[in-house]
Structures are given as C-alpha cells and as structure tokens.
Image: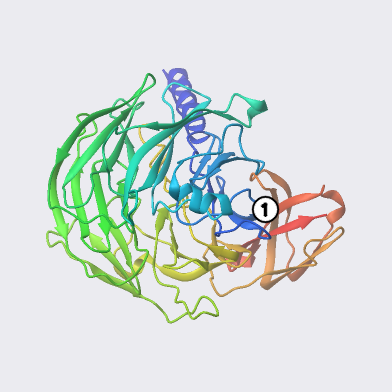
C-alpha cells in the first residue's frame, strides 16, 4: 500500500513538472516604436523565476497593432506589426511580407511605421493537434474609394515553424474569416473550448450593433460557428480592449466611449449571457483594461484615472484606486496616463501609458482589493518609446500549468530587476558590461549571491559574503548575459540585476 502511494506521488510530481514546462506561448513581449531604424527596442522575457528586459534591434517598427508568439517552452518564435512577420532572429520570415494588403498598408508599411489597425487587432494561437503550426488573426482596414471612411474585416494567416530550420514560413496568408462582413476594429480575443483543445475567437460587429461573432478554431478548419446579439449597441472606436477571465467564464469589453460591458460565457456552447454595462466617461486617448488573475476584479485605465471593478460586489461600480502622479514622459509634455494592459505570466498587470512613451506601469498585486493592489507608476523605463503591447489569452487553461506564478521576480526600475521586498533599495554593478570582474554594491550586507543564465539555470552560488560589496570574478563566465540575484542578511535585501560579460 505504501509503495503504491509513493508511485502515485511520483506520477503527480512528474505530471506537474511536465505541465509547468509547457504552454508558455506568452513569455515574450516584443514592443517598439514607429520606426525600427537606429533603435534597440525592448523585449520583456519571462522565465520560471525572472523577468528580463532585453534590448534588441528588431526587424519592425510598431504603431499599436502587434502580436508576439513563443513556443510552448517560452522561446520566441515570431512577431508582427500587421505589415510583416519577423523571425526570432529579427529577419522577415519567408513569405512573411504583404500582410493586410490595401491602401492603409501602402500608406504605412512602406515607410516602416507598422500597421494602423488599432488596439488588440492581432492575435496568435497554436493550432490544435499541431506542434509546429500557428494561426494569426489580424484586422485589415480598408478605405472606401474616394472617401475618408474606413471599415475593417477579419483575416487569418497560417505559419508553419517546421520550415527553414525552425525559423518558420507563412504557408497561407490573408484568408478572410468573415466573408463580406464589416466588423468592429480591434478587440480580438480568444478562450479555450471546454474540450481543452479547440479555440473560440470572439469578434464584435460593426458600430451601432450588439452582435458578436464566434469563430471556432479546430485542427481541421477555421469557421464561423455562430453569432449572437446581446446587450447594448455600441460605438466602434478602436481604442479599447476585450478579454476573458483566466477560467474563461466571463468576458468584458471596455471602450472609452461606451464604458464596460461584462457577460458570462459558456465555453461549451459559445453562448453569452447575463449582460451588464458600467458606463464611464471618456478621459484618455488609448485606454486599456484587464482581468485580475483570479477573475474577481477588472482594471480600467482611463486617461489620468485607474479604476477597479469588484465583480463580487452586487453594486457594479468603478472604484478609483490610482490617479496620475503628474509625471511627464517626454519633452513634449505628454503625461504618463494609464493605457493598454496585459496580465503577465508572473500574475502582475503590465500597462502602457496613453501615449507612445518610454515608461510602463505595473499593478503588483492585482488580486488584492483597492489600493492594496499596489500600483507602481512608471515602474519600468525603456530606452526607446513604446506604442504597443501584445494581447494574450490564457494558453494554460485546461492544462496542469497554472495561469500565472506570483513567485516570478518582477521588473520595477530601469535595467533593475527586484523582488519588491524593498522598492527603494538599489544595487549597483560596475563595470557592466565587463570583460573581467564585476563589483557588486548593495545598500545592506550581502548574505548570498546567485548567478543564473538568461534561462534561469544556476551557474554559481556564493554564500556568507557578509559585506555590502563583493567583487565577482568574471573569468569563469563565458561571454553572454547573466542574472545576478543578491540576498541580504536576514532577507533584508532581495534584488536582481543583469550583467553582460564581453
């Protein structure tokens, strides 16, 4: 009996380990600015125990449209700005040019600005039962001939990563999903079917209607599975976000004009129900919203105001939890308002400003009510302006892998990575980069230093330092990027930073 129990426990441990090593399709955020020329743009890279800010010369410029896709182990595969698709090596993928052909593409893509299709106008999913194929949904904006009027249709593109030694190839491109149907701009989101394999993709109808289209993605095809009219009519503005809760039971759409729409969702039938509307006033340009990881709260960034909606409260209301602190993001005087959001694999919510600025806000504890959620304004400073943040569904729904892991260490400052134990404490490492030694200086006595590679593998552990400075011998490190984790005496300091050995 005891031996059977041991075998069962071993199987549980093995099963959990396998689950937690997969489904990391959202572990890289490729972000950038209108032009990629002369810039090194930021990539937020998540591992099981850290968040790394990498600056690389990416292949594309971005406006708001964007998508990033990693493999199930968290390695970057490809990204797109709505004009072209780039590989992990920052080259244009084979057959990856010419996305969304038309006048809007001619006006923007030729100059490297990125496609101007609005927030959340791209989404990528792994194709069911395939280990190499991915589907990319994307809005195509069209101009009415001899007019300034615009309308949007929804298309998809198929990428097969088995080509070109794993760099991928576009094998189908610009395939219409909703033929002869004009749809609203942006707000593409998805959730797993209850079978744990297929995907529901939701797209709203054109303005002044309350119709939602349900697209079912299976291993065999992509098809319109139905449509449903529910709730109020709305105005298509392209400046909002939509999302499902992590468990897939609730859906919201937030618009700067219409406020918050909330509905229940049946993942088996694809039916919406229990429509609710929370009106808001327009306060900003590019607004954003996100569910908390536990699904209890919805956060709304509305210009200078950040609100929290508690879905456990019978009174549907928006509680103000943070106001813009007056920080100006550039020499044009543009403010770091609250904008587009995405919940990270570390259970924090990452938030852009309302303009293309060099800063990002973080909600550190989004499962906590009120100001206990700990909003850190302009917590991250990039080297370049950023206009986009990719949207990801919960790829780990119906898998053994948790939606997110709050133990992952979080970025909270320029080129610094800290645990949040003491947000005011600062650690310096110099010289950095270095071809030799690195001098580590902490604000309190150091107890232990752990060196890991960029994927979180431990290279070395140094114990019992008992001083505020330590000279790290760089001779045993090969050229590359490493993460230094410093633990203070009695856990008074818990800090991380990146070093580059040259």
Looking at the image, is 428 positioned above or below residue 263?
A: below
In this view, the residue in front, 407 or 200, is: 200
Provide residue 371's location: percent of width, then percent of height. Answer: 33, 70
Provide residue 409's location: percent of width, then percent of height. Answer: 54, 56
Q: Is residue 135 left or right of residue 231?
A: right
Q: Secondary structure at mark 1?
A: loop
Q: Quadrant of the C terminus?
A: bottom right
State which quadrant residue 175 falls in.
top left
State which quadrant residue 91 falls in.
top right
Q: Is residue 398 left or right of residue 253?
A: right
Provide residue 339's location: percent of width, then percent of height. Answer: 39, 64
Which residue is at a point 31% across and 61% down the rendered structure image?
A: 299
In this view, the residue in front, 322 or 124, is: 124
Q: Is residue 251 left or right of residue 52?
A: left
In this view, the residue in front, 268 or 175, is: 175
Q: Quadrant of the N terminus?
A: top left
Which residue is at a point 44% across and 43% down the rendered structure image?
A: 102
Looking at the image, is 139 positioned above or below residue 329?
A: above
Provide residue 430's location: percent of width, then percent of height. Answer: 78, 68
Looking at the image, is 304 positioned above or below residue 291?
A: below
Give the residue number, with chain letter if any, for mark 1.
Answer: 57
Which residue is at a point 23% across and 37% down the rendered structure image?
A: 213
Residue 399 can be seen, yes or no:
no
Coloration of the structure image = rainbow
Residue 19 can be seen, yes or no:
yes
């Amino acid at each position: 009996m005891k031996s059977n129990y041991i075998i069962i426990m071993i199987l549980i441990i093995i099963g959990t380990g396998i689950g937690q090593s997969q489904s990391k399709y959202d572990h890289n955020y490729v972000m950038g600015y209108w032009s990629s020329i002369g810039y090194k743009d930021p990539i937020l890279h998540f591992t099981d125990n850290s968040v790394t800010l990498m600056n690389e010369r990416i292949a594309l410029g971005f406006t708001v449209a964007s998508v990033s896709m990693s493999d199930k182990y968290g390695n970057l595969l490809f990204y797109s700005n709505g004009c072209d698709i780039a590989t992990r090596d920052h080259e244009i993928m084979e057959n990856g040019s010419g996305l969304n052909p038309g006048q809007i593409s001619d006006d923007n893509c030729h100059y490297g600005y990125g496609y101007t299709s609005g927030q959340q106008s791209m989404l990528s999913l792994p194709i069911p039962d395939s280990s190499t194929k991915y589907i990319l949904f994307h809005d195509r904006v069209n101009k009415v001939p001899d007019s300034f009027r615009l309308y949007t249709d929804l298309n998809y593109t198929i990428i097969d990563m088995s080509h070109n030694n794993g760099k991928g190839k576009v094998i189908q491109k610009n395939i219409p999903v909703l033929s002869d149907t004009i749809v609203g701009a942006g707000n593409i989101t998805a959730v797993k079917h209850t079978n744990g394999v297929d995907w529901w993709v939701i797209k709203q109808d054109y303005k002044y209607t309350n119709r939602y289209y349900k697209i079912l993605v299976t291993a065999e095809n992509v098809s319109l599975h139905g449509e449903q009219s529910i709730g109020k009519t709305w105005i298509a503005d392209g400046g909002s976000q939509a999302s499902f809760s992590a468990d897939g039971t609730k859906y919201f759409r937030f618009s700067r004009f219409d406020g918050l729409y909330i509905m229940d969702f049946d993942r088996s039938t694809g039916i919406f129900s229990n429509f609710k509307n929370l009106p808001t006033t327009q306060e900003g340009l590019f607004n954003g919203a996100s569910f908390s990881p536990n699904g209890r709260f919805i956060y709304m960034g509305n210009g200078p105001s950040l609100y929290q909606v508690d879905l456990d409260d019978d009174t549907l209301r928006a509680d103000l939890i943070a106001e813009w602190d007056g920080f100006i993001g550039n020499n044009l005087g543009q403010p770091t308002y609250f904008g587009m959001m995405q919940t990270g694999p570390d259970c924090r919510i990452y938030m852009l400003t309302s303009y293309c600025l060099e800063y990002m806000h973080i909600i550190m504890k989004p499962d906590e009510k009120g100001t206990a959620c700990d909003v850190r304004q302009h917590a991250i400073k990039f080297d370049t302006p950023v206009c986009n943040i990719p949207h990801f569904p919960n790829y780990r729904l119906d898998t053994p892998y948790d939606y997110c892991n709050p133990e992952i260490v979080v970025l909270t400052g320029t080129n610094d990575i800290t645990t949040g134990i003491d947000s005011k404490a600062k650690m310096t490492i110099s010289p950095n980069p270095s071809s030799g030694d690195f001098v580590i200086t902490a604000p309190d006595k150091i107890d232990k230093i752990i060196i890991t590679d960029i994927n979180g593998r431990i290279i070395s552990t140094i114990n019992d330092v008992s001083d505020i400075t330590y000279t790290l011998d760089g001779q045993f490190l090969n050229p590359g990027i490493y993460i230094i984790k410093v633990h203070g005496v009695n856990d008074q300091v818990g800090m991380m930073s990146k070093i580059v050995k040259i």
